[in-house]
């Protein structure tokens, strides 16, 4: 499998383990992404047993603003755990350099952290 331009990794900090089975949606902003144009669907995938998504969209994305939506509510509900976050959205900018974008998400039912990985 070819690795896509954007990848993600979800870790459940409550259990200290990868978060398998989290659905992730990648979208591109049309217009400013806030009020004008909305968002266009690019790809959808689900984290593997290691909490990773390697095939999320094409090998190369056009420069622009993108967002990843992590369906954390369904992930926690599957374990019978209440969460404050029904979903988590991370918005980021892709530039024209062609560099890879890796977006890790560390999540628990009531806290989150995300950063640009490598």
Image (spheres, rainbow, N blue to C red):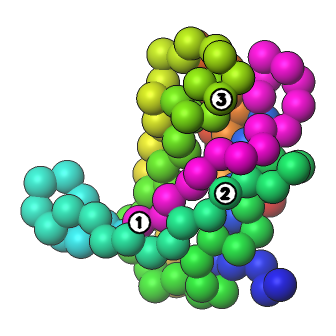
Marks 3 and 1, the one that precedes in the sequence: 1
Is 13 part of what is drawn in magenta? yes
Marks 3 and 2, the one that precedes in the sequence: 2
103 up-or-down from 62: above or below: above
Residue drawn 65% across the image and 77% down it: 5
16 vs 84, left or right, is right
**Disc 2 versus disc 1: distance between alpha carbons?**
15 Å
Q: Secondary structure at mark 3?
A: loop
Crowd class of label 2 (few under 14; some 14 to 19; many from 20; radius 10 Å): some
Which range is magenta?
A: 12-27
27 vs 115, left or right, is left
Quarter of the image with the N terminus is bottom right
**Disc 3 versus disc 2: distance between alpha carbons?**
14 Å
Q: From the viewer's perspective, is the residue at label 2 or at label 1 nearer?
A: 2
Residue drawn 31% across the image and 71% down it: 40
64 up-or-down from 62: above or below: above
* Front position in the image: 20 or 91: 20
Where does label 2 land, which residue?
A: 46
Percent position of residue 43, x then y: 51, 72
Q: Look at the image and tell me whether residue 25 can be seen.
A: yes
- Residue most toward the left? 36
Percent position of residue 109, x then y: 61, 17
């Amino acid at each position: 499998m070819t690795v896509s331009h954007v990848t993600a990794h979800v870790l459940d900090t409550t259990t200290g383990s990868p978060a398998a089975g989290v659905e992730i949606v990648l979208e591109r902003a049309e217009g400013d992404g806030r009020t004008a144009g909305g968002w266009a669907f690019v790809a959808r995938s689900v984290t593997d047993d290691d909490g990773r998504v390697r095939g999320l969209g094409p090998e190369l994305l056009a420069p622009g603003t993108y967002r990843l939506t992590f369906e954390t509510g369904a992930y926690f509900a599957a374990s019978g755990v209440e969460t404050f976050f029904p979903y988590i959205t991370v918005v980021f900018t892709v530039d024209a350099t062609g560099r890879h974008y890796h977006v890790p998400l560390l999540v628990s039912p009531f806290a989150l952290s995300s950063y640009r990985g490598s």
